Image (cartoon, rainbow, N blue to C red):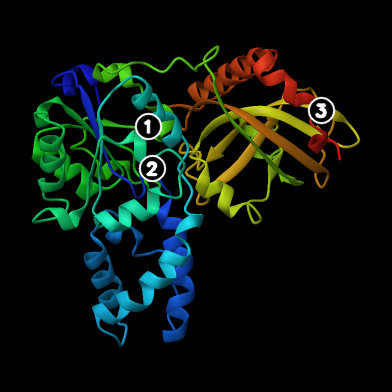
Amino acid sequence: MSMSNSLKKLTSCVLIDLDGTLINTDGVVGDILRKYLCKYGKQWDGRESLKIVGQTPLEAATTIVEDYGLPCKVDEFNSEFYPLFSAQMDKIKSLPGANRLIRHLKVHGVPVALASNSSRANIESKISHHEGWKECFSVIVGSDEVSKGKPSPDIFLEAAKRLNKDPEDCLVIEDSVPGVMAGKAAGTNVIAVPSLPKQTHLYTSADEVINSLLDIRPEKWGLPPFQDWIENTLPIDPWHIGGPVIKGFGRGSKVLGIPTANLSTKDYADELVEHPSGVYFGWAGLATRGVFKMVMSIGWNPYFNNKEKTIEPWLLHDFTEDFYGEELRLIIVGYIRPEANFSSLESLIAKIHEDREVAEKALDLPTYVKFKDDPYLTK
């Protein structure tokens, strides 16, 4: 979608959703439902995730009880579910880019309202586990403080009112379709950050759709730009993964001419959920071969339409043979771009080589080169 066509007016404040936008509530909810449904002989397979994302707690509970045919009433379900959820609330992690965004807006004096379909008390409890968050929000509005939750515009209209702003001066950031609908009904500009994979086609009414909060460009909306990009890369909190190389020299070499060293995703389910699809880079260590620069993709590779999210590192060195089965250690230190689809194999290959050039250049910078000596890579 062209920004020039969709941007109505520069904004002066931000109204942002909480669950699925700033914090990964879905992961904890899924874990609880997986265990809870077992007692009824049911299996949570995530098929209702698309239905319940963005719903009020009562609507979500009703959906689960009805769709799974549970032999209990909605209020009974809630009375059992919410104590379990409250006990796990401290385990809900912020999503990549969330801390960066809200602290950036706070530093630059941009008024920010937290506007969620959760109750006010529930919102307060969730953000209490994230240091400094409460102070970043000028206003907090829950669904129990208005007549109707999203997709009604009431929450966003109330948030704008409390900020003493016109809705058309506000930028809404949302992960759900009901949230996007609410923002548009309120008359705001809306950025959608879909929390469920492969669902961007549902967000056509949004003014912009981005892959994750790492990709937000505030200056597009008249807000202060980030100043933390370095040579077309974004430093991130380093994270580590490792395991035996299972594949990649096949399709990577034969089709793309790029021999990736893929890791199994079996032991990294949490990391795959936590980190958005896209292109990252860092350092790769092989105990018997050394430490090498690395660029990697996480995602579904839309051109090949993978069924599962994969981790595909490309070690930037010319190896004379594959090293299937060898233990590979990775430190991921930076982000380049979101995952994208391509119209041709040639354009995909060209972009991959462009990513390589960006990563190779960046990894010589002090910000990133210091991680090359991390003992994790060769232990």
Circle 2 residue: 22
Mark 3 vs mark 2, foreground winner is 2
Name the element at disc 2.
loop
Name the element at disc 3.
strand
Q: CA distance from mark 3 to mark 2?
A: 35 Å
- Decide: few, some or many residues near mark 2? Use Cα within 10 Å; few <14, some 14-19, many ≥20: many
Whichever of labels 3 and 2 marks the residue nearer the N terminus, that label is 2
Please name the amino acid that badge 2 sits on.
Leu
State yes or no: discs 3 and 2 in contact (Cβ < 8 Å).
no
**In the figure, 163 relative to 56: above or below?**
above
Name the element at disc 1.
helix
Which residue is nearer to you in this view: 350 or 153? 153
Horizontal arrangement in the rendering, residue 251 relative to residue 206 (left or right): right
How far across and how far down the image is residue 203, in percent? 24, 41
**In the figure, 38 relative to 357: above or below?**
below
Please name the amino acid that badge 3 sits on.
Val
The answer, for residue 347, to whether it is visible in the render is yes
The answer, for residue 340, to whether it is visible in the render is no
Q: Quadrant of residue 285?
A: top right
Label placed on residue 291:
3
Label placed on residue 102:
1
Label placed on residue 110:
none
State yes or no: discs 2 and 1 in contact (Cβ < 8 Å).
yes
How far across and how far down the image is residue 341, in percent? 43, 32
Residue at figure coordinates x 68%, y 30% from the top left: 314
Mark 2 vs mark 1, foreground winner is 1
